[in-house]
Structures are given as structure tokens and as C-alpha cells.
Amino acid sequence: MSLLVSMFAYPFIVRAFVVGALVSLCAALLGVPLVLKRYSMIGDGLSHVSFGALAVALACGFAPLWFSIPVVMLSAFFLLRIAESSRVSADAAIAVLSASALATGVIITSLTTGMTTDVDSYMFGSILAMSRADVALSVTLAVAVLALFAAFYHPLFAVTFDESFSRATGVNVSMYKTLLSLLTALTVVLGMRMMGAMLISSLVIFPALSAMRVFKRFRSVVVFAGALAVGCFCLGLAASYLLSTPVGATVVMCDLAAFLLCAAAGRK
Amino acid sequence: MDEKTLLACRDVSLGYEHKPLLEHLDFEVRAGDYVAVLGENGSGKSTLLKSLLGLTPPLAGTIDRSAQKAGRLGYLPQQTPAQRDFPATVEEVVLSGFLNRRGLRLFYDPHEKSQALMHMGKLGILELRGKCYRELSGGQQQRVLLARALCAAGELLILDEPVTGLDPAASQDLYKTLRYLHDREGIAILMVTHDVDAALREAKTILHIGQKRWFYGTVEEYLRDESGKRFGGANK
């Protein structure tokens, strides 16, 4: 208990807690349809694009968030289009895009500022990165994602389960998919600076995978994934405070542990 | 227009931009019909299906989709690999068939729920309703999707290769179910299939599409027709 009190005495930890918990929740909710539709790597691709965009923003002196959000949203839109077209295989396209974005980011930083701590924190995350604006933005995002899930739960289920049936019965499939990818882009940009470009996609993938091991009802999978993500984030944050380890990596380890537990429980 | 017409193609051409696969296609599906669509790979069966569902517009001509517009069309698509390990209960899947009948409401109403139960009962999957979709056999999964299609359909069912991946016993079961829905429930069926034997045995009408040529008529007429002799004759 005294640990919690001393932890939350630091304002930056409070901010990190709020942003992290909300981003984890959103990532987990969006992750369920993304994983089921075999778009798991989109989160990963987007985080690399986000890294490239942040590097460009830093070098040119743009406001990092306001520059990278539109760039990442645009790439999310294109990634989805690529994933839909049968001409290029989606996983290869995502790999190409993410490697190129990462390379762009690395070259630009080495030409301008060099590999500073800023850049390091973009790659692997930093608990110090959250500003007041981030808190406001992540609260807005969380509200948007939760509202989306509540209002469009049934069509989202139908689109995730069977696109062709949904299309034939008159559901606007592309709208839902675009919405999904744009919200994912926002989540990735917000979460990236705390979790790190290399690690953020775990927030999208792990909770959904873990929940699917244990539950058989779609609704339970969604609810459990959200709850598990928040739980793992809190554990990870506390552990990183105690052990002085980087917060992103610690949260991923918690997610991994939860996944292993769920996988074991699902086998019975 | 006859009000019993559920789906009609009038002078329709299908294909890609500069390459029509099929021209001047003319046919209609009416209440009580059982149509099998046959044709070689690449003859345009899936393009036809997309146009019939209103997903891609035809190159020329008009398609009258009255059943779909009235929300009376059910569709059984081919399964995707992603579906086979989907975490959802049978009941959740079946209820999603009502999506076209509702605006944005948070819950399905009791009437829809009881209808879904009825459809599940009809297809013999009522006791599976709490089960997870991914734990079912291929034949059971197909029944679940058929129940979902029934929730969306009142008058016309469109099926895309319904027995693909099913073992012979499960295929026979599925055909029996379709016959029941057609004979007893009065639902018109349009089924795209590779299974020529079953098409000749089950359907009343055949739509055969081939290179630049198409045939539409009863099974007897089809067997006398050139394409029927070539396609179905080997099975006789």
C-alpha cells in the first residue's frame, strides 16, 4: 500500500498510469477484431511508421503528436487497402512499409540530432514521455473507442466474423474497417512513446490472444481482453517502479505471463 | 413486374473492364424455384454471384434484386480460414443474421431471439447453441451459417458452393435440409455448385454459364442441351 502511495506521489507516474491504462484498454478492444481478421501485424507496422514520423517531426521542429497522427492514420488507411487487395500479400506489404519507415527515421535522426535519449525513448518507451496534452488526448480516444464498441458491437461482430455475408446483407463493411484502422492508428501513436515503437503492438495482440484461449463467447472475449490489458498494465507499471526496469518491456512481460497462464487454463 | 419475382437479370453482361465473360444474360428467380448454377472454373460464376448480391455492378443490363431490397435474402458464403477458429457461440453467429433488419440498437429483441431459436431447431442445432463455433464439425458449422442466413432470409437463399469441404454424409444431410426448406418452407434457392450430380438431382432449374454462352432451363431441357450433354452427360 505504501508502495502505491509513494508511486502515485510522482505526477509523471499518475499521467503515465492514466494514459497507459486507457491506451491498453483501447488497444485490447481494437485488437480482438484485428487479430481475428489476421491483421495482427498492422499495429506493428504502424508503430514503425509512427517512429519515422516522430523522427521527421523532431528534425523539422514540428509538434510531434500533431505531425505523426495524420501520417500514421494515412498509413493505416493504406495498409488496410493493401491487406484487402489480393495482388500483394498483406504481411509482406506491412513488412516493407515498416522497415522503410524505420529506416527513414534512423537516417533522419543520424543526420540531424544523432541518437539521443529522445530517439531511444521512441524505440523502447519512456515513462517520462506523457504530457498533459497526452492525458487529454488519451481520455478522448478511450471514450471514442468505448463508444464505438458499444454502439457498433453487433455490426463489428458481423464484419469480423464474415465480411461477405455482411456486405450482402447491406452492412457498410469498408466504413467499419476504416474506422477500426484509424482508431488503431491513434492508439498506436499515443501508446508508442510510453511503450516504445518496438513493443506497442504487443498491447494490441496479447490480450486478444489470451482471451481467445479461455473464452468461447465473443462478448466475453472482448470484455476479458480489455480487463486483462488494464490489469497487466497496472502490474507492469508497479513492477517497473519497483525494479527500475523500462515500463514498456515490463508491461510486455506481464502480458506474456498472462498469455501463458491463459493458454494453460485453456488446455484443460 | 410480377410480384413473385425475387431476382431477375435483364440483358446482363458480366466480366472485367474490357473483357466481358458473359453477355445478354436473361433469367429470373421466382418464389418456389430451386436453381443450380453450374459452369467451369473461370466462367464467371463468382462474378455473377457478386452481381446478384449487388456487390459489383454488371457491365451492362439491369439486375432486379427485389428480394434483397425487401430484406428477404439470405446468403451462405464460402467459409474463410479465419472463421474456423473464431471464438463465438453458435447463438451469437446465428443472431448476427438479423443485422439487416435492424437499425442501431444495442440488443436483439425477444422476437428475433425466439425466431433464431426456431431456425436453430429447424436445422437441428438447437442443442449446440451455447457451444463455440470453432469446436463444431464442418457440417455443423455449415448448418449454423445456414441458420444465420435464414434469419436474414424469408424468401430467397443464395448459396455459394455449400458442400465444399464437407464429407459425403454431411453433404447429403445439407442437401436434405435444403430440400426441406424448399419444399416445406417455400424458400426459393439459388445455389452455385461444382457438384453436377447433386445439382441435377436436387434442383429444378439449371443455369449453366460457359465461355460466351449460357443456358437456363429445367433439368430435362438441360440434359438435352449441348452444354448439358457435355457437362452432365458423363454422369449419366
Image (cartoon, coloured by chain):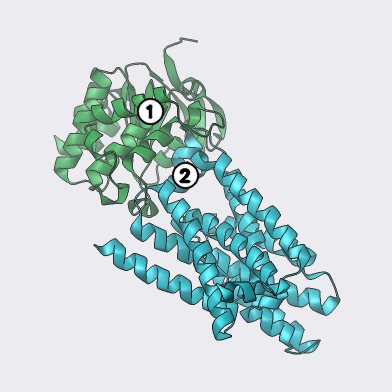
Q: Which residue lies under the disc numbered 2?
A: A157
Q: How many marks?
A: 2
Check disc 1 and report its element: helix, strand or loop. Answer: helix
Please indicate whether residue B28 sits to the left or right of residue B195 in the image. right
Residue B233 screen position, x and y as percent: 19, 35
Chain identifier of the residue bearing label 2 in the image: A
Q: Residue B183: x percent and y percent?
A: 24, 18
- In the rendered image, what is the letter of the chain coloured green? B
Q: Quadrant of the N terminus of chain A?
A: bottom right
CA separation in Å, label 2 and label 1: 17 Å
Against B5, is B106 above or below? Answer: below
Q: Which chain is cyan?
A: A
- Residue A89 seen: no
Q: Position of residue A188 (x, y in %)?
A: 63, 65
Q: Which residue is mark 1?
A: B113
Closer to the eye: label 2 or 1: 1
Q: Quadrant of residue A81?
A: bottom right
Residue located at (73% from left, 58% from top): A137
Neighbour class for label 2 at 10 Å: few (<14), some, many (≥20)? many
Q: Secondary structure at mark 2?
A: helix
